[in-house]
Amino acid sequence: MPELPDVEGFRRTLASCAQGHRVERAEVADPGVLRGVTAQRLKRELKGRRFAAPRRHGKWLIAPTDGPTVVLHFGMTGRLVCGAESEPVGRFERVAFDLDDGHRLGYEDQRKLQGVWLAATDADLDAILGEQGPDALSLDRADLDRLLAGRRGGVKATLTDQSVVAGLGNLLGDEILWRARIHPQRPVNTLTGAERDRLHTATREVLRASVRAGRVPDEPDWLTGRRDAPDPHCPRCDRPLSRARITGRTTLWCPHCQENRPG
DNA sequence: TCGCTTGTTGATGG
DNA sequence: GCCATCAACAAGCG
């Protein structure tokens, strides 16, 4: 589930739950989510450390402490939960931090596609995140032109490539392109100025609403709200939507509203 | 049993 | 260098 809006919600969870608090104990229920760090070292290096203000880049959550920095990625099924230490832990809790005020911050993930890293330095952090484009939330109109210049791939593949723009996943990609009325397979080098305007506006609008909701809304006036219908129809024109596998992901679009040629 | 799933990475070939 | 495709990672669901 986690795309930019979900991770932004996790950032807020971490800030309200853990910022300014000390880790009394780090627990590792499943070392299968640890990346480049052993359970022993994670526990040792975080014990007694105090969480500072967390930040987010794309789908990455970066949680500095007064010691090392905890780096989290949520894959397709991860989430971050805060509760009282006395509450029962979730079935998929893999790592948890017991804090000095009795709260517990839990990293839960059913599928373990991504996980938890520990960075000692800025160089470590850069190596963990890899090449990241600018965060989608701070993308201005000129950035978009710069990013698309010289590329010739399909617009959806480009938009959801984290090294081009960070934070957009499969659902957001489809939602933004539907709102901008651009076909997902349009080569980016054929987009007109008017289309890039629409793309930028749609990105801002979709992200603003999604971040507020803490997820990509699945309301009926959103494309995402129609995804799981057996015979989905376009929220805008009510004609049948198309569904196909594009660059390895299930893609939903309206063949009537989303033009596959400049326009 | 098979196919499907909102994440990323790396190999391969054009 | 860019791009598309595929396999792999892991676990659950229908």
Image (spheres, coloured by chain):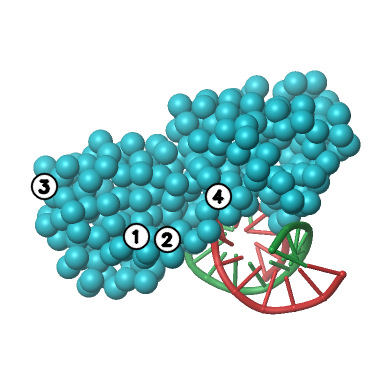
Chain colours: A cyan, B red, C green
Task: Measuring from the top left, give residue A246's x and y in whole percent.
Answer: 76, 51
Q: Are marks 3 and 2 on the same chain?
A: yes
Most foreground residue, A122 or A225: A122
Q: CA distance from mark 2 to mark 1?
A: 6 Å
Task: Measuring from the top left, give residue A32's x and y in whole percent.
Answer: 38, 69
Residue hosting label 4: A133
Mark 2 nearby-residue class (10 Å; few <14, some 14–19, many ≥20): few
Query: Which sits earlier in the primary sequence, circle 4 or circle 1?
Result: 1
Side of A177 relative to A4 (left or right): right
Q: Is residue A141 above or below residue A110?
A: above
Residue hosting label 1: A122
- Chain label for disc 3: A
Q: Which of pointers 3 and 1 indicates the residue nearer the eye?
A: 1
Question: Total marks drawn?
Answer: 4
Most foreground residue, A66 or A22: A66
Q: Amino acid at mark 2?
A: Asp
Q: Are marks 3 and 1 on the same chain?
A: yes
Task: State the residue at coordinates (75%, 21%).
Answer: A236
Q: Is residue C11 above or below residue A224?
A: below
Q: Is residue A79 visible?
A: no
Query: Which sits earlier in the primary sequence, circle 4 or circle 2?
Result: 2
What element does badge 3 sit on? Answer: loop
Task: Measuring from the top left, give residue A24's x and y in whole percent.
Answer: 12, 55
